[in-house]
Structures are given as structure tokens and as C-alpha cells.
């Protein structure tokens, strides 16, 4: 089968209706289509391991309904931790590199970046991570163009700032900032020449149309975001979404596949919620186009897949050497 040229598939004019129609295809057709796109644009053996570290934890003034780090939800059991020392962060990055990660992502529970000692420390962390030969990503809340520029000059690879959901559903999830605030930060990130890491969360009570609407907005960016994390809600007790039931793994697969088709060249990251998936469901997500995972025992404040489980996952993906297996007589 001849496959059309790459350029033909990088579309910025997907409609939400078209995306819903793709999402709702018969599952096996959807996965097959996503896998064709994936193979056309990527080496399927290249699954990036990224490591995450919370460099400043809790006490955030925003009211994101999913987030254990919001200061609004006092029932959440979370130890607030002030800004970590740069040396400790770089030691964690070096350990992550030794364990096989080639991207190090640092998160701070800030509403927005403020110039001063805290931000200067983050710039040092970025320089230190890059000096280790790793990609560096940070997620620090809202920022302006000159702050984005300073991050770019420090060598930052990408800035993570998620849209989280559709503009229509957003007011159900966050009231302390607007969707337009999110978009303004993303424009500052792009204006500074940084890569954009931008995705969302499924399983917060949104509809399939909301998921498609978010992808429609992501596809409208030119260029597309280089990195798209798809998180499944990790319900945390004490947050407004703490009692939400976990999504069906097949819904995760459908969302990953649809993201792969709409944003063919992006690195699609199988992010929070992975620990609730079986090894086989995770592999199905990879068949559907996921090509990165967060590696390491913790996400920001919640547990991730254990190292042993990930060893088993990557061992299953590796080639077999059946020639050395004794034959049954
Ligand atoms: N304060 C910054 C911000 O909001 O951009 C950065 C940190 S914030 C924790 C980064 C992302 O983590 C959120 O945008 C959200 O997509 C994801 N996240 C947070 N809590 C989550 C949860 N309980 N389940 C799934 N994803 C979550
Ligand atoms: C993203 O989209 N997911 C990561 C990363 N970007 C920063 C964060 C997931 C956080 C899950 C909840 C927690 O551990 O606090
Ligand atoms: Fe704060 Fe980010 Fe959590 Fe929202 S998601 S409460 S902005 S740390």
C-alpha cells in the first residue's frame, strides 16, 4: 500500500465532528488506523521514558477540581514541601538518567511564575538537567513571554501547560482562571521558541465531544504541540473529583488513538492513570500510538507504576530470542 506524503496528514483544520467520528469508529478500525499513522511518522520501537519530580509541592491558590495540590481542598492528605534545593533536584535527575530516563520534567504548584529567587533556582535546575544530557521540561503555571524567553535561554526543551479539557467543560473544573489564560501562556511559550507540551485529562465526567473539542483546539496550533500528555484522572480523596470512578481502559485506548491520528507527529504521552492499566492495556495504548511514559515510582504527588512493573512492560516489548529456547521433545 502506498502511503500518502507526510504533509498531507498534518492538518490544522480538523472539526470537532470529524474528531468525534474518528473516536467512535469500530475499535479495531480505530486502532489499525492510528497504528498506520504511528508507523508512518515514528519508529514504533522508540518509547521515551520521562521522569517527573515535584520541586514545590502543594499550597496552590488555584482550585483545579482534580488536583491534590490545590490549597482549596483541606481534606486532602498532602505534605506541603517548599522549593527543593537545586542540588537535590539534580541528584534526582542523575538517578533518573541512570535508570534509563532521557527527559526530566519538574513541576511546581504555582499559579504563575514570579520573577525572583524561586524562578532563578528553576533556571539553574534547567541548566543542570541539560548539562546531564537530558531533555528538560518544566510546568510552573502561567507565565509571560519574557519569562518563557529566559527559560529558553537556560536551555529548556519544552514547557508543559495542559488545556486539560474542552473550553465548554473547563468551568466545571477550574474557576480561578479562564481557558483564555491557558491559551495566553501557550502563546508565550511558542513566541519564545520553546516546544509545547500540552494535553489533558480524561475521566472527569466530560463527554466524548469534550475530549474531541480539546483535540480540535490542540490541532489548531501551528505547529502542533510537539508533546501531548494524555492523563486519566487519578481520583484523590478530598478533591471534588475524589469519588469519580476510573475510566474504562478501552476509553483510554480510544483517546490515545484519536490523538495519534489528529496530531500525527506529536509524542503522545501515556501519563497519569497508567498504574491502573494492565501491562496488556498499556501495550494496546502503544499499538494505538502512545510513544512515551512517565517512568519512576511517583508522578508529582501520587504513585506511578513500580520499577518492576515497568521492567516487565519493557521486557515484553523487546525482541525475543526464541532460537535459544530448548525445543520440546
Ligand atoms: N501548576 C501547574 C499547572 O497547572 O499548569 C503545573 C502542575 S499541574 C499538577 C500539571 C498537570 O497535572 C495538570 O495540568 C493536570 O493535567 C495533571 N494532573 C494534576 N492532578 C491530576 C490528577 N489527579 N489526575 C490526572 N492528572 C492530573
Ligand atoms: C502531565 O500532563 N501529567 C503529569 C505532568 N504533565 C506534569 C502530572 C500528573 C500528575 C498526577 C497527579 C499527581 O501525581 O499529583
Ligand atoms: Fe495548582 Fe496546577 Fe494543581 Fe491547578 S493543577 S491546583 S494550577 S498545581
Image (cartoon, grey):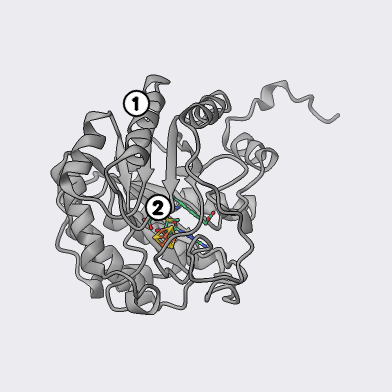
Tell me what residue is drawn at x 63 percent, y 40 percent: 310
Regarding mark 2 in the picture, which secondary structure is present there? strand
Left/right of residue 313 with respect to residue 41 in the rendered view: right
Tell me what residue is drawn at x 36 percent, y 31 percent: 126
Depth check: give the residue in front, 112 or 37. Answer: 112
Cα–Cα span, label 1 and label 2: 24 Å
Residue of label 2: 229
Residue of label 1: 127
Give the vertical position of 100 relative to 173 (above or below): above
Depth check: give the residue in front, 83 or 296. Answer: 83
Residue 178 in the image: state x and y as whole percent: 26, 70
Residue 51 in the image: state x and y as whole percent: 50, 38
Which residue in the rendered view is the most extreme toward the right? 329
Regarding mark 1 in the picture, which secondary structure is present there? helix
The quarter of the image that holds ligand 3 is bottom left
Tell me what residue is drawn at x 46 percent, y 72 percent: 65
Residue 38 in the image: state x and y as whole percent: 35, 46
Quarter of the image with the C terminus is top right
Depth check: give the residue in front, 170 or 207. Answer: 170
Query: Is the CB–ligand 2 distance for label 2 below 8 Å?
Result: yes
Q: Which mark is residue 59?
A: none
Amino acid at each position: 500500500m502506498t502511503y500518502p506524503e507526510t504533509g498531507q496528514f498534518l492538518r490544522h483544520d480538523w472539526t470537532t465532528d470529524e474528531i468525534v467520528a474518528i473516536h467512535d469508529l469500530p475499535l479495531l478500525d480505530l486502532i489499525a488506523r492510528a497504528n498506520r499513522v504511528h508507523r508512518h511518522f515514528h519508529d514504533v520501537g522508540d518509547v521515551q521514558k520521562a521522569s517527573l519530580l515535584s520541586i514545590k509541592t502543594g499550597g496552590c491558590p488555584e482550585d483545579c477540581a482534580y488536583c491534590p495540590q490545590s490549597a482549596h481542598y483541606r481534606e486532602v492528605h498532602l505534605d506541603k514541601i517548599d522549593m527543593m534545593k537545586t542540588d537535590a533536584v539534580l541528584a534526582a535527575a542523575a538517578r533518573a538518567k541512570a535508570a534509563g530516563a532521557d527527559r526530566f520534567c519538574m513541576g511546581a504548584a504555582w499559579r504563575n511564575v514570579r520573577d525572583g529567587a524561586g524562578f532563578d533556582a528553576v533556571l539553574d535546575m534547567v541548566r543542570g538537567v541539560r548539562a546531564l544530557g537530558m531533555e528538560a521540561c518544566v510546568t510552573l503555571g502561567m507565565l509571560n513571554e519574557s519569562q518563557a524567553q529566559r527559560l529558553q535561554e537556560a536551555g529548556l526543551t519544552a514547557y508543559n501547560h495542559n488545556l486539560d479539557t474542552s473550553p465548554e467543560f473547563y468551568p466545571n473544573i477550574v474557576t480561578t482562571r479562564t481557558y483564555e489564560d491557558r491559551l495566553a501562556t501557550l502563546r508565550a511559550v511558542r513566541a519564545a521558541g520553546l516546544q509545547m507540551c500540552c494535553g489533558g485529562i480524561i475521566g472527569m465526567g466530560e463527554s466524548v465531544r469534550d475530549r474531541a473539542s480539546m483535540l480540535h483546539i490542540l490541532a489548531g496550533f501551528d505547529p502542533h504541540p510537539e508533546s501531548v500528555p494524555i492523563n486519566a484522572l487519578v481520583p484523590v480523596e478530598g478533591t471534588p473529583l475524589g469519588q469519580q470512578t476510573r475510566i474504562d481502559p478501552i476509553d483510554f485506548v480510544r483517546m490515545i488513538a484519536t490523538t495519534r491520528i489528529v496530531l500525527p507527529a506529536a509524542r503522545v504521552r501515556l501519563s497519569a492513570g497508567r498504574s491502573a492499566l494492565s501491562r496488556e492495556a498499556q501495550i494496546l495504548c502503544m499499538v494505538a500510538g502512545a510513544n512515551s511514559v512517565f517512568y519512576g515510582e511517583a508522578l508529582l504527588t501520587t504513585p506511578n507504576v513500580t520499577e518492576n512493573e515497568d521492567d516487565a512492560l519493557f521486557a515484553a516489548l523487546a525482541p525475543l530470542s526464541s532460537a535459544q529456547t530448548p525445543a520440546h521433545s
